[in-house]
Image (tube, helix red, strand yellow):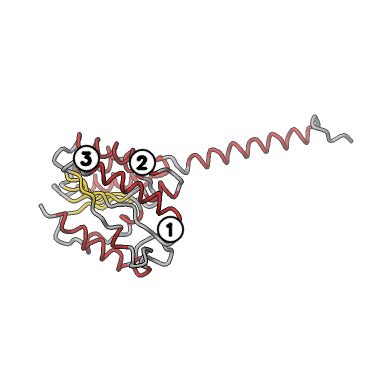
Amino acid sequence: MSRGLGSPRVRILALASLALSIVLGVVWAFRNLPIRFERTIRGFEAYDRAHGWPEDAVLFVGSSSIRKWPIDASFPNYATIHRGFGGCFLSDVDHFADRIVFPYAPRVIVLYAGENDMDDRRSAEQVFETYRRFAERTQARLPRTQLLYLPIKPTPERWALWPEMKRANARIAAYIEHHPQQHYVDTATPMLGEDGRPRPELYADDGVHLSPAGYALWTRIVEPYLEP
């Protein structure tokens, strides 16, 4: 029996292969879309409806380095709002700002995001442009709010990306110099040892997230910027 290209079996296999390619393409695209965090964002909104939020608070927002930070224990003398969602890009923070940033009208925003963007092979210029867009929107909506940018941190696991991460940090730092309500809070440089590489004691076993010593360092650096 002929099993050429025109046979039913081959046509079915070709269609199945095409369908699989489409499904995989959709899945790959979805992994980068903000909608993947919709359930998390709705959870934040439900909590806000049930409990409200403090006025003139310090808002911590960003990726898993924010989510894992024990904010209440680290900053017991400040009214804080904790809005970290692990795996997010800086572009996701910007996308959801109308729902989990601007409504709080915080006194200070502490932002850490961009590391996952660069792990996704986005360029330093792309990360800078996203930060600039978020900062401009924040200044327009919250003209009295101070924005603290924590630079992308060097990590053992993502060390190969550090040169491009440094370029993103430098681009953002240069921009911040011209905006008095924005502050570049250098939590990155102190994480490097005398050999110029990440200090192992500051990182969790995965080589990406912070250890308790890492968070203690960040807390010491950030706290002076939270004074009224």
Q: Nearer the viewer, residue 205 or 102?
A: 205
Q: Which mark is residue 67?
A: none
* Vertical relation: 13 (above or below) 116: above
Query: Is residue 211 left or right of 57 when viewed as pictured?
Result: right
Q: Do the residues under discs 3 and 2 have CB atoms within 8 angstroms? A: no
Residue in the foreground of this view, choosing between 78 and 213: 213
Q: Which of the pair 54/227 is nearer the observer? A: 227
> Which residue occupies the extreme front position in the image?
195
The N terminus - image quarter:
top right
Graded by Cα atoms within 10 Å as few (under 14), some (14 to 19) or many (20 or more), the crowding at tag 1 reads some
Residue 162 location in percent, x, y? 40, 54
Q: CA distance from mark 3 to mark 2?
A: 18 Å
Earlier in the chain: of badge 3 and badge 2, it is 2
Q: Amino acid at mark 2?
A: Ser
- Residue at screen point 17% across, 43% down: 181
Label number found at residue 159: 1
Q: Secondary structure at mark 2?
A: helix
For label 3, the residue is 103
Percent position of residue 217, x then y? 26, 64
Left or right: 74, with 92 as reference point: left
Q: Compute the Cα span from label 1 to label 3.
A: 36 Å
Residue placed under numbered mark 2 in the picture? 91
Residue 42 is left or right of residue 20, and the answer is left
The kind of residue on which mark 1 rests is Trp
Q: Position of residue 101 (x, y in %)?
A: 25, 43
